[in-house]
Image (cartoon, grey):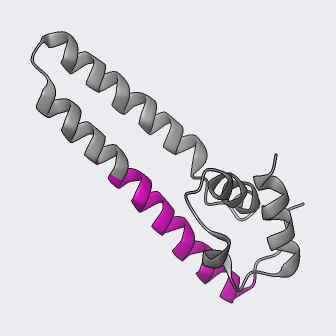
Amino acid sequence: MPSDWSPAEKKIARCVFDAALHRELAEVMQAFKSRAAKATEPDDMWSTEEFLTKSRDSIDRKYDYRYSQLEFVFGRLLREGRISEGELAGLSEDKMQNIIHISTL
């Protein structure tokens, strides 16, 4: 399913990927700050650490910037509502169809 990426598509992909990653990291940062501010017991500290570990693992698994994986990454991000089809404007019709199909799985 993965295909070749033109220089223009690579530029679009990098911008969309970086923006989605930045938004998700900002969400995690906000949740971390909220949890840390509410911590009153040592157990709160460890649950915050567990939250960060799980968040990092999830982000590391999800955000894979290999061209062979980007259609899958974008399909998942589209399904999760982290990106929109409009952000992907400029990708080939084949890539868009693949990404949209993946987003429905």
Q: Kindly identify the residue that appears in the image at 62 percent across and 74 percent down.
A: 13
Residue 24 is a magenta residue: yes
Q: How would you classify the magenta stretch by its main secondary structure?
A: helix
Front-most of 10 and 89? 89
The image quarter in which residue 71 lies: bottom right
Q: Position of residue 85 (x, y in %)?
A: 68, 72
Q: Kindly identify the residue that appears in the image at 80 percent across and 63 percent down.
A: 100
Residue 23 is a magenta residue: yes
What range is drawn magenta here?
A: 6-26
Q: Kindly identify the residue that appears in the image at 81 percent across and 81 percent down.
A: 92
Q: Position of residue 14 (x, y in %)?
A: 56, 73
Q: Is residue 86 left or right of residue 33?
A: right
The image quarter in which residue 46 lies: top left
Q: Kindly identify the residue that appears in the image at 27 percent across and 25 percent down.
A: 48
Q: Is residue 85 above or below residue 57?
A: below
The image quarter in which residue 87 lies: bottom right
Q: Is residue 51 left or right of residue 98?
A: left
Q: Name the image quarter holding the N terminus.
A: bottom right
Q: Position of residue 18 (x, y in %)?
A: 48, 67
Which residue is situated farthest in the left direction here? 40
